[in-house]
Amino acid sequence: LFVGRIEQINEIKKFTKQSTYGRLENVFLVGERGIGKSSLAAFLYHYLKEKEDFLSVYVSLGGVESLSEFIRRVFEQILTEVNTEKSLKEQFSDFLKEKSKYIKAVDLFGISFSFNPPEEDLENMLRNFPEAIKGILEKIKDKKDGIFIALDDINGLSCKSEFANWYKSFVDNVSIRYAREFPVFIMPIGIPEVRDSLGKQQPSLMRIFRVIN
């Protein structure tokens, strides 16, 4: 399916394995328009979900420019993935009950979730993202080896200093509070101009990412 991409796939799989030891991995997948970045992300989503026992989450962020919508979509997709596995759904029953008035099941080619909490809740989830993800890891630790989150089409966010600064703060907080206890692999995806734009907003951020072209 990916002629000429085996080297990149194996490199990504190596970082995936490293994350299972409890280390947050941040890989930026870079490529020109139409070269197959989203197809590769879809392959990784299914591979890690079916072969490597990851909670695998694919988030499409086309047109998203605000942090609140970004975090809403991330947790909406996490809830959708949790819903696909009965054992995980049971682990999240308390959260689902607590947030039930903000969650709506959408029956479209299988059940997915629409998650629309108030802005205040979204701000709290954004501010406490490391704690929220750590809480999810605790719930799934007996079932999954880690979490994979693909952030596709981050064009609208890459030019926002708020997003760049938030991402840097998130990584710093994880390294200080959850060293070797955070088996998470996050993969932003974009064209070279998007990567460069993000670097201009927060130069230190580029040292965080392992870049795969």
Image (cartoon, rainbow, N blue to C red):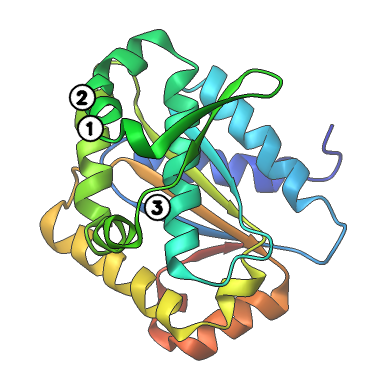
Looking at the image, how many numbered discs can be counted on the residues?
Answer: 3
Mark number displayed over residue 94: 2
Give the CA distance from mark 3 to mark 2.
Answer: 29 Å
Mark 1 → mark 2, Cα distance in angstroms: 6 Å
The answer to whether residue 156 is above or below residue 28 is: below
* Quadrant of the rendered image containing residue 83: top left
Q: Residues within 10 Å of mark 2 (few under 14, many from 20)?
A: few
Q: Does the residue at mark 3 contact the one at mark 1 (Cβ under 8 Å)?
A: no
Q: Secondary structure at mark 2?
A: helix
Residue placed under numbered mark 1 in the picture:
98
Along the line of sight, the residue nearer the viewer: 82 or 110? 110
Residue 172 vertical placement versus 10 (above, below): below
Residue type, mark 3 in image = Glu
Dividing the picture into quadrants, the one containing residue 94 is: top left
Verify CB contact (< 8 Å) between mark 1 and mark 2.
yes
Left or right: 101 as drawn, with respect to 29: left
Q: Is residue 56 left or right of residue 182?
A: right
Q: Position of residue 78 (x, y in %)?
A: 44, 36
Percent x, y of residue 31: 75, 64
Q: Nearer the viewer, mark 3 or mark 1?
A: 1
How packed is label 3: few (under 14 Cα within 10 Å), some, or many (20 or more)?
many
> Percent position (x, y) of residue 173?
19, 64
Q: Which one is in front, 117 or 30?
A: 117
Q: Which residue is mark 3?
A: 25
User: From this viewpoint, which residue is outermost toward the front?
Assistant: 101
